[in-house]
Image: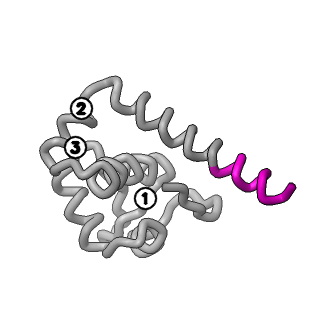
Amino acid sequence: MKINLQDKRYYSIGEVASKFNVNPSLIRFWEQEFKILNPKKNSRGYRKFTQKDIEVINKIYFLLKEKGYTIQGANDYISKSKTSKKLDLVNKLKLIKHKLIEIRNQL
């Protein structure tokens, strides 16, 4: 899934949830279930997500929603070192495909 967020240092949970088309409560749930997802919190306790956090959420979303993994299965898959390389490759290929389709449509 390709998401477009403005170039900011931090994003609120509402911004991130709306880009992934999920409820903020689901992202809070994923934060509890996946130790790799650990956004910063300000003094009031509001979560502030960095670009790295959004990439982690993208991996989690891909495994759970698109591949149909269970929470435990996704945790196991993420814990393997090869996982991030494969997911990054899949995301890069999807981006290339999207760009090629755009070019084809312009012709």
Give the residue number, with chain letter if any, for mark 2: 79
Q: Which residues are magenta?
A: 98-107
* Residue at point 16%, 50% (across, down): 70
Q: Is residue 104 left or right of residue 36?
A: right
Residue denoted by label 3: 74
Residue where numbered disc 1 is placed: 49
Residue 15 among those drawn in magenta = no
Specify few, some or many for label 1: CA neighbours under 10 Å numbering under 14, 14-19, or 20 or more.
many
Q: Tag 2: Cα neighbours inside 10 Å, few (<14), some, or many (≥20)?
A: some
Q: Are marks 2 and 3 in contact (CB under 8 Å)?
A: no
The residue at 16%/42% (across/down) is: 73
Mark number, residue 33: none
Quarter of the figure with residue 93: top right
User: Which amino acid lies under the numbered mark 1 shown in the image of this protein?
Assistant: Phe
- Residue 3 x/y as whole percent: 54, 60
Q: Residue furthest right?
A: 107
Q: In the rendering, at what x and y percent does residue 2 appear?
A: 54, 56
- Classified by dominant secondary structure, the portion drawn in magenta counts as helix
69 lies above or below 18? above
Q: CA distance from mark 2 to mark 3?
A: 8 Å
* Residue under the image location 58 percent in, 63 percent down: 5
Q: Earlier in the sequence, mark 2 or mark 1?
A: 1
In the drawing, does residue 17 fall left or right of residue 8? Answer: left
- Is residue 57 positioned above or below 48 on the image? above
| Disc 3 element | helix
Tag 3: amino acid: Ala
Q: Nearer the viewer, mark 1 or mark 3?
A: 3
**Label whose residue precedes the other's in the sequence (2 or 3):** 3
